[in-house]
């Protein structure tokens, strides 16, 4: 395969050629199935035979069988996994904790669920690097973003999850949710909060111009508007607040011309939105927007502005107090600090008159399931990922790497206020794109412009 001449090591390299294994049609088809099913198909669609065979797990099993039947591919895959040793080691430590927790708590899902997610992560790294390529991975992700953002509007009009109604083939805890009389859309996820996490990742990638290799917030203006409307319709205050932060960070990493254009568009958008809200403040969509904005302001400023638009001040206050109490879980003497409860046992506790059953904090939930060893090892994985991201971004100064850094940062930041809700596969796919691009750059430098075979 012809390599690409590297004219300037500090500038973006245009890898316009297809990945080395693109010609393997069966493997390419399996990765296409894995990619689209991961983003579009809900977790409750599949077949239960001893355990849940979701679309993503079926794709994983087929990929594993393909590699077993093709030992050279399997060997190459294992080699690629070890190239990511910076995150491989903490993930192996995390799986070790999951393993002994599984044995001590007699709960196979305690190990099996995170193992399958991590296996998918490394499958995707290999697939993006050698089979589908990062440009195609971005395009496929944007196709999914368009589909889901339009579906989100349809779901809001229907006032229920159409996926939950027509695609539920297995038992699930998912259910339609409402807040202050407004339906909260949840897309392919099991809860509106999980869908909000996915939208944060979409927002970052939607700002990437893969032709000019630049960051521009309004690169896909229609998609950006659809995504922001979907964020509002999730009814999640944390997602809306983090999305605003994410937009600010995207502007921060844009070049000067892009910032000027974006600020002009934002100003015009605020004027148009303000006019719409003034003229049509009585409509459901306007009240939903105003409710979302004022609920975030209430959270920050301690006001009660959202009450004017149907917000329940008492419920919002209880929700905030509830989250403030979650760190007190670390002080419970009946939770073992070295052996977690696993994923099967339900958790509930009363603290200061609040009955805590739902853990809206991913990191504290990790402590409950896997104790300090599990929580710390996963925290090391997150920190290792960001250290690698920052080093690579500083070295290469690539627009795509900057956007992935911003998107994943906002995702893991939002996990302080919500649980992951089976959305880790989404952020793993985005992280995998970063690793695949970094490996491709490294291979090009190593082989003097010749891609690794």
Image (spheres, helix red, strand yellow):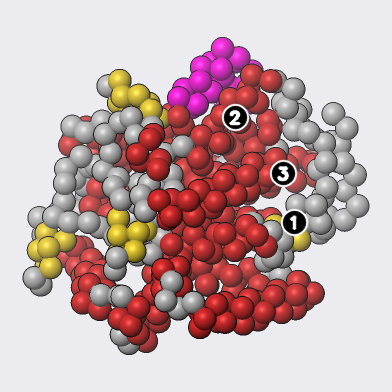
Residues marked 3 and 2 touching at CB (< 8 Å):
no
Which of the two discs, 2 and 1, labels the residue nearer the N terminus? 2
- Mark 3 highlights which residue? 135
Which of the two discs, 3 and 1, labels the residue nearer the N terminus? 3
In the image: residue 15, left or right of residue 82: right
x and y percentages locating residue 297 in the rendered image:
40, 81
The C terminus appears in which quarter of the rendering?
top right
- Mark 2 highlights which residue? 31
Which of the two discs, 3 and 2, labels the residue nearer the N terminus? 2
Is 318 above or below relative to 29? below
Identify which residue is drawn at 40% across, 40% down. Answer: 163
Indicate whether residue 73 is drawn in magenta: yes
Q: Range of the magenta residues? A: 58-78
* Dominant secondary structure of the residues highlighted in magenta in the image: helix
The Cα atoms of the two marked residues, 3 and 1, are separated by 10 Å
Disc sitting over residue 209 in the figure? 1
Identify which residue is drawn at 83% across, 41% down. Answer: 16
Is 323 above or below relative to 49? below
- Tell me the SS state at disc 1: strand
């Amino acid at each position: 395969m012809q390599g690409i001449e590297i004219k300037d090591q500090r500038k973006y390299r245009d890898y316009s050629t297809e990945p080395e294994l693109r010609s393997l049609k069966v493997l390419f088809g399996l990765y296409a199935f894995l990619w689209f099913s991961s983003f579009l198909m809900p977790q409750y669609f599949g077949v239960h035979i001893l355990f849940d065979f979701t679309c993503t797990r079926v794709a994983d099993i087929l990929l594993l069988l393909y590699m077993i039947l093709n030992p050279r591919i399997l060997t190459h895959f294992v080699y690629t996994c070890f190239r990511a040793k910076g995150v491989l080691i903490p993930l192996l430590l995390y799986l070790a904790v999951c393993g002994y927790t599984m044995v001590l708590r007699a709960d196979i899902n305690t190990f099996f669920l995170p193992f399958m997610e991590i296996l998918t992560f490394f499958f995707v790294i290999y697939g993006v690097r050698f089979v589908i390529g990062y440009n195609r991975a971005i395009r496929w992700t944007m196709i999914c973003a368009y589909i889901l953002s339009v579906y989100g509007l349809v779901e809001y009009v229907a006032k229920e999850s159409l996926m939950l109604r027509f695609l539920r083939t297995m038992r699930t805890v998912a259910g339609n949710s409402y807040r202050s009389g407004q339906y909260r859309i949840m897309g392919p996820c099991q809860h509106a909060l999980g869908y909000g996490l996915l939208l944060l990742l979409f927002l970052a990638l939607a700002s990437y111009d893969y032709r000019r290799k630049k960051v521009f917030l309004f690169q896909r203006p229609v998609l950006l508007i659809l995504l922001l409307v979907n964020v509002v319709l999730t009814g999640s205050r944390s997602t809306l607040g983090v999305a605003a932060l994410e937009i600010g960070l995207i502007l921060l990493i844009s070049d000067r011309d892009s910032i000027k254009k974006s600020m002009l568009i934002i100003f015009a958008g605020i004027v148009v939105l303000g006019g719409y809200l003034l003229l049509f403040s009585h409509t459901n969509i306007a009240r939903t927007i105003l409710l979302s904005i004022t609920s975030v302001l209430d959270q920050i400023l301690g006001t009660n502005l959202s009450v004017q638009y149907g917000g329940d001040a008492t419920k919002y206050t209880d929700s905030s107090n509830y989250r403030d109490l979650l760190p007190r879980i670390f002080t419970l003497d009946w939770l073992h600090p070295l052996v977690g409860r696993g994923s099967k046992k339900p958790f509930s506790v009363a603290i200061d008159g609040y009955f805590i059953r739902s853990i809206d904090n991913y990191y504290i939930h990790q402590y409950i399931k896997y104790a300090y060893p599990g929580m710390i090892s996963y925290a090391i994985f997150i920190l290792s990922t960001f250290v690698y991201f920052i080093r690579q971004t500083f070295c290469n100064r690539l627009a795509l790497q900057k956007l992935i850094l911003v998107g994943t940062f906002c995702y893991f930041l939002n996990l302080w206020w919500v649980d992951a809700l089976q959305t880790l596969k989404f952020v793993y796919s985005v992280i995998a794109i970063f690793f695949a691009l970094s490996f491709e750059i490294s291979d090009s430098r190593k082989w003097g412009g010749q891609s690794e075979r």
